[in-house]
Image (cartoon, coloured by chain):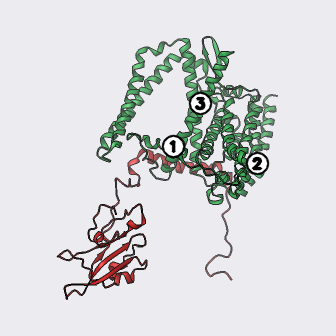
Amino acid sequence: MPYKGLPEVVTTRRRSFWESVYFVEVCKGLAVTGRHLLRNLLRTGEMPTVQYPEQRRDYGPRFRGRHRLLKREDGSPRCVACMMCSTVCPADCIEIVAAEHADPAIEKYPASFTIDLLRCVYCGLCEEACPCDAIRMDTGIYEIAADNRQAFVVDKDFLLHNDKDGTL
Amino acid sequence: MVPLVLEAFAKIVFMFLLIMGFVPLLIWAERKGSAFIQDRTGPNRAAVLGIRLAGLVHPIADVLKLVFKEDVVPAQRHRFLYAFAPMLVMIVAMSTYAVIPFGDYLEVGGRRIPLVVADLKVGMLYILAIASLGTYGVALGGWASNSKYTFLGAMRSTASMISYEITMALSLLGLFMIFGTLQITQIVAGQGELIWGWLPRWGIVVQPVGFLLFIAAVYAETNRTPFDMTERDSEIVAGYHTEYSSLKFALFFMAEYAHMVVAAALIAALFFGGYQIPWLPRPMLEAHAGMLLTGSLAAGGCLSLVVAWLYFRRARRERGWYNDSREREPGFLGAVAALVGLGLLGSLTLAPWSVGAAGASIFVTVAQTGCFIAKVAFFAWLFIWVRWTVPSFRYDQVMRLGWQIMLPVGLLNLAATAVWLVIAHR
């Protein structure tokens, strides 16, 4: 039983004589590619290619790059170690060890906060889940490279002082 | 005897350098041309002291990479044939060149040097014989690697070779009947005449169908798109050279381009008048050598100066783009072009219009060889152009095209040529 709305037999158009001779069509194709070639030869500057390391494309403000941890006014992390982000993380890449804070108004603080950047899928659920706006992915850094796996597991200090130099 | 050997050696060296010079240029043209056809920039990073030459440095980087790469070989290979196959491919690609003339003759000290390595009386048969040897390298390489993909590639290569060899021979037979000789130099010389006083008697004019058959057959023999089924990535990985790496792969890779140069030279020599400059036969070139030399020097000089001006303009426009040594490139190239232009224009003070007989002979040779190289370059470029335009045929389509269409058309063309010759010579 064929699906409704679909033709039962797929018909192909009969080729005309000149199409079946093939050489004429090849010449037409050569004209098309030749036009592209000439246009790009004469107007090299108008090519859409971005010469990457020198020129960079601007990303939108909502682009999710490498994470950073935000600070309070006194410089301590805003994070209260509520584990929301590490719970919601689909890649299970956030690991938080909580400790009791000296200030009774704050309850907890992260003794260690590590993110495995190799596992992270940059989905942004952690910043959505955070009740204190303590983690954000707004650094715009997307060039993340290192020569060993350990270097991709970044800790609290690193995330607190994340800057845009692009190195790990 | 000694001068003969020296002559032959010089001609062989010239031909070798011509092909080996074309190979990196073609690899560059393939990359850059395909990029421009697809609206990309193509390679432009490799640089020597900031000089990139629009990606021409990349073939050097390629060769360096391939030389220093590990030579991974399959354990169950046939040792001798595995090493021998890439050599055989290269030898075959090189040896076709022996019978293709790149000029008619050069007069030095009263001696007439024919500008062809070996002027065989059976040149056309030699070309067909060597062309069919080309499949041995591919087939042996595919078989000796002891892998299924390479074996499939080798099988396909053999199949297409058998199918298209016949068409190739049939298309060449038409030429043979028209020019009445198998000697390539004679065929090229015969193409210098004019029909009705204005149309050059090129192979494509007297054998248009033969030309179409020949070009299709030659594309099949060189395994280029649309007949690239011996190395089709989407079906059999890399075909016959899947198991090759390092310098052995480099040999296969270079042989493919050397084959293209040879095929382009064959098309140029057999169907586009070889070294013949249309409407400028040798006597006319010799008679007006001084004037033509002056004109070409002046035109070349002016052209170089225009190129230099364009480069200098670009240098000014691109200042501050990179902030490194690459910014020196347009200025450097502009300076080179300006020097060449000034040199060419400066040579006008040596009175080239009153050039002697010996100088005229050299001028004719240079002009004709230049014309031949230009034709070869165009047809080599056509290989690349077609590859990035036309989708490949399926294996069964290749076979059907070869046996059911091109073979009968070839036979009909042969019969038509024979009938026409009988009528014309009655």
Quadrant in which residue A143 is drawn: bottom left
Q: Which residue is mark 2?
A: B163
Q: Secondary structure at mark 1?
A: helix
Q: Which mark is residue B64?
A: 1
- The chain letter corresponding to red is A
Chain (green): B
Eyeballing the image, is B34 above or below B278? below
Q: Which mark is residue B372?
A: 3
Please indicate whether residue B253 sits to the left or right of residue B398 in the image: left
Residue neighbourhood size for the residue with mark 2, other residues' Cα within 10 Å, grouped as few (<14), some (14–19), many (≥20): many
Residue B268 lies, in percent from the top left, at 63, 34
Give how far across and how far down residue B418 sits, in percent: 80, 35
**Residue A109, how many percent across, how many down?**
26, 82
Q: Is residue B122 above or below residue B157?
A: above
Residue displayed at 35% across by 34% down: B309
The residue marked by circle 1 belongs to what chain? Answer: B
Type of amino acid under label 3: Phe
